[in-house]
Image (spheres, grey):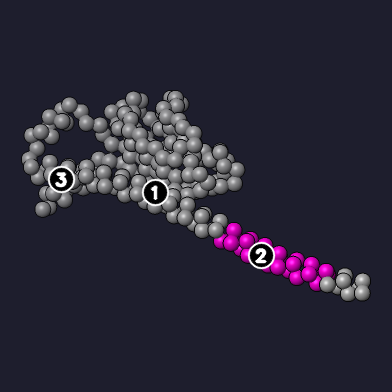
């Protein structure tokens, strides 16, 4: 049992991951950075807009040579995995340029890990059954975490849609009720004015 725990913590130590949630104001650009010390690092980048506006945002991924690797406009979510060709600092930027007034809540995950080499794959085939089970469990946990993030993002968007619909229905009902009251008041005064005019003629 101790051997399993040590191996699991060793596998976790090989991965450098950061999960953040950030409110991005309108017309704001914010960048986050991850460093790949060797060109064989594998970088995974995931983001999703949870609240605000139409749930879209502009993003850009730049390499250490200032070359744009990925770029998108009005995207609701993205999931990318790429190999760091050059060692150095990689920039992950978000820009809320489409919305004039709406702030956006963005959740994103940046993971830097070693890419599997042929010699590593050969070693994995020679590992014992317990080690392979731990690696499989770690991989399955990553998949479960990704699914949980996706469903949480869907839940937040659906909740925002329901809240917006509820607010519109409330205001429409209030306006409708106000119109009914105004029409009733106008009718009362119109009928009163009509009978008053007839009495004055007599």
Task: Verify CB contact (< 8 Å) between mark 3 and mark 1.
Answer: no
The residue closer to the viewer here, 101 or 81, is: 101
| Residue of label 2 | 180
Task: Verify CB contact (< 8 Å) between mark 2 and mark 3.
Answer: no
What residue sits 56% from the left and 56% below the top?
168
Give the main secondary structure, helix, strand or loop, of the magenta stretch.
Answer: helix
Q: How far apart are marks 3 and 1 (CA)?
A: 29 Å
What residue sits 26% from the left and 44% below the top?
143
Observer-side mark, 1 or 2, equals 2
Q: Is residue 1 left or right of residue 16?
A: left
Q: Check disc 1 and report its element: helix, strand or loop.
A: helix
Q: Where is residue 156 in the image (x, y as percent from the top left)?
A: 42, 52
What residue sits 71% from the left and 64% below the top?
183
Q: How crowded is mark 3: few (under 14 residues within 10 Å), some or many (20 or more)?
A: some
In the rendered structure, which segment of residues is drawn in magenta? 170-194
Q: Position of residue 67 (x, y in %)?
A: 44, 25
The residue closer to the viewer here, 10 or 198, is: 198
Which numbered tag is attached to residue 88? none
The residue closer to the viewer here, 158 or 144, is: 158
Q: Is residue 174 magenta?
A: yes
Which numbered tag is attached to residue 153? 1
Answer with the quarter of the image where residue 92 lies.
Answer: top left
Which numbered tag is attached to residue 134? 3
Q: Is residue 110 left or right of residue 102?
A: left
């Amino acid at each position: 049992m101790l051997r399993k725990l040590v191996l699991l913590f060793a596998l976790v130590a090989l991965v450098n991951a950061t999960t953040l949630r950030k409110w991005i104001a309108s017309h704001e650009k914010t960048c986050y950075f991850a460093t790949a010390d060797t060109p064989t690092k594998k970088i995974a980048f995931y983001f999703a807009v949870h609240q605000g506006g139409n749930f879209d945002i502009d993003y850009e991924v730049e390499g250490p040579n200032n070359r744009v690797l990925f770029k998108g406009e009005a995207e609701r979510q993205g999931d990318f995995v790429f190999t760091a060709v050059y060692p150095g600092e990689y920039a992950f930027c978000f820009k809320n340029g489409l919305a004039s007034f709406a702030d956006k809540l963005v959740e994103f995950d940046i993971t830097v890990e070693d890419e599997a080499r042929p010699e590593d794959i050969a070693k994995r085939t020679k590992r014992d059954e317990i080690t392979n089970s731990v690696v499989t469990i770690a991989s399955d946990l990553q998949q479960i975490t990704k699914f949980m993030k996706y469903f949480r993002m869907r839940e937040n968007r659906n909740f925002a849609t329901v809240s917006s619909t509820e607010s519109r229905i409330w205001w429409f009902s209030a306006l409708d009720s106000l119109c009914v009251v105004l029409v009733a008041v106008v009718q009362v005064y119109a009928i009163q004015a009509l009978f008053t005019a007839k009495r004055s003629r007599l």
